[in-house]
Image (tube, grey):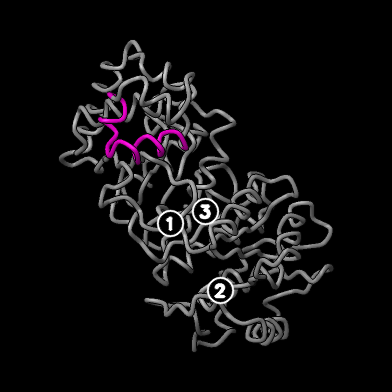
């Protein structure tokens, strides 16, 4: 647990207007600790960060003690039967190694839930549109579920659409998921994800670099995106328009030396244009979770759906391909993502199901399940 004086120094340093992360790192490097930095003489501060920042830092903000008290109380509330809560400064052994290797890691993290997930070296981000198509939402869920089943930790941003679907898929796998948020951890945004955030805190991890009480300001979300990209070995974009924030995450992943993957879609869909742009720029086109794992030469812990089942495809009530289709129109790409099977395998089984009257081929290379009367 972080000590009171250290927390007070961090909150003062990071909360002082005009003292950004670059200045803060410079001060800590020069003085050896955050406590020494905020207590340094004015002249020494001026030499390092200039007059405006040093003058601001020399003033102890009113209400700082109350903020420290509230933050320590929040941390203590994670003891006992509640999900653990921690305030993790850079240099703490619990600080995620992957994030530390990026150009601009947060200096202080707030975490709630399974803290061990921060040390995962098999984490991957899944991001995309806040307004995905039903197919895109299902694709995100199924990629997350299949990667989770194989042992990957799914990281996303708790936003509407693809983010939420990815978290849900990861929770269904039981492997764990990290939600990086753009608010303080005492707030949930969007509010409709209150239940999802609660379940993630119980079975995964909520993470933020923003102090308690921080509202959802627009400027915070690109900062959140760099943490999503930095925590992971790669970023998978499922659906994204050309102006999507998901493309920011993909760019940040590239700048951090991480892999970028994109799921292709229809050339007529605005929600596919961002993914297609990424592919043109060198992102790896993926159709299945196995494609992602192959890039890392990853051996899955378990691939329950990696091989087609042995039962007859005519057994409609137990056929997993029919289950994967659901009851809406579905594309071949979506079925590949949902099952983890190869395109060739699915084509063979679809033909068999068509011949048996269990599947109908619709215009636009779509398929639909036909239930017996």
Q: Residue at x 42, y 24 (%)?
A: 46
Nearest to viewer (mark 2 / mark 3): 3
Q: Nearer the viewer, residue 234 or 64?
A: 64
Question: In what element is the residue under mark 2?
Answer: helix
Residue 334 locus on image (x, y percent): 65, 67
Question: Disc 3 designates what residue?
Answer: 229
**Residue 271 image position (x, y, % from top left):** 74, 52
According to the picture, the residue beneath numbered tag 1 turns out to be 101
In space, the residues marked 2 and 3 are separated at their CA atoms by 26 Å
Image location of residue 6, percent across then percent down: 24, 31
In the rendered view, tell whether residue 92 sits above or below residue 74: below
What separation in Å lies between label 2 and label 1 (alpha carbons)? 34 Å
The residue range painted magenta reads 22-39
User: Vertical placement of 274 versus 318: above or below?
Assistant: above
**Sooner in the amino-acid sequence: mark 1 or mark 3:** 1
Q: Which mark is residue 339?
A: 2
Q: Is residue 142 visible?
A: no
Q: Looking at the image, tell me whether mark 2 or mark 3 is earlier in sequence order.
A: 3
């Amino acid at each position: 647990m972080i000590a009171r004086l250290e927390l007070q120094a961090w909150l003062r340093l990071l909360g002082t207007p005009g003292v950004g992360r670059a200045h803060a790192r410079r001060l800590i490097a020069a003085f050896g600790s955050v406590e020494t930095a905020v207590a340094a003489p004015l002249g020494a501060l001026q030499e390092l960060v200039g007059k405006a920042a040093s003058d601001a830092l020399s003033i102890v903000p009113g209400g700082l003690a109350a903020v420290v008290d509230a933050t320590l109380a929040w941390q203590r509330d994670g003891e006992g039967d509640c999900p653990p809560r921690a305030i993790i400064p850079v240099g703490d052994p619990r600080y995620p190694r992957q994030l530390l290797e990026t150009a601009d890691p947060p200096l202080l993290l707030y975490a709630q839930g399974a803290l061990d997930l921060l040390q995962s070296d098999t984490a991957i981000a899944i991001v995309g549109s806040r307004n995905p198509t039903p197919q895109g939402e299902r694709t995100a869920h199924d990629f997350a579920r299949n990667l989770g089943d194989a042992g990957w930790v799914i990281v996303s941003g708790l936003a509407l659409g693809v983010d939420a679907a990815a978290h849900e898929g990861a929770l269904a796998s039981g492997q764990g998921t990290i939600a990086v948020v753009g608010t303080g951890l005492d707030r949930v945004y969007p509010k409709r994800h209150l239940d999802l955030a609660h379940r993630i805190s119980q079975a995964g991890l909520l993470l933020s670099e923003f102090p308690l009480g921080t509202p959802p300001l627009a400027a915070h979300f690109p900062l959140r995106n760099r943490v999503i990209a930095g925590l992971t070995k790669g970023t998978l974009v499922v659906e994204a328009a050309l102006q999507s924030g998901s493309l920011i995450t993909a760019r940040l992943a590239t700048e951090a030396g991480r892999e970028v993957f994109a799921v292709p879609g229809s050339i007529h869909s605005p929600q596919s244009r961002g993914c297609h742009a990424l592919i043109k720029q060198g992102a790896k086109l993926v159709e299945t979770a196995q494609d992602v794992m192959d890039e890392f030469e990853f051996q899955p812990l378990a691939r329950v759906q990696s091989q087609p089942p042995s039962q007859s495809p005519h057994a409609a009530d137990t056929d997993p391909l029919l289950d994967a289709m659901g009851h809406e129109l579905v594309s071949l790409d979506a079925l590949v993502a949902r099952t983890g099977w190869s395109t060739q395998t699915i084509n063979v089984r679809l033909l068999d199901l068509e011949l048996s009257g269990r599947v109908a081929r619709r215009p636009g290379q779509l398929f639909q399940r036909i239930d017996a009367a």
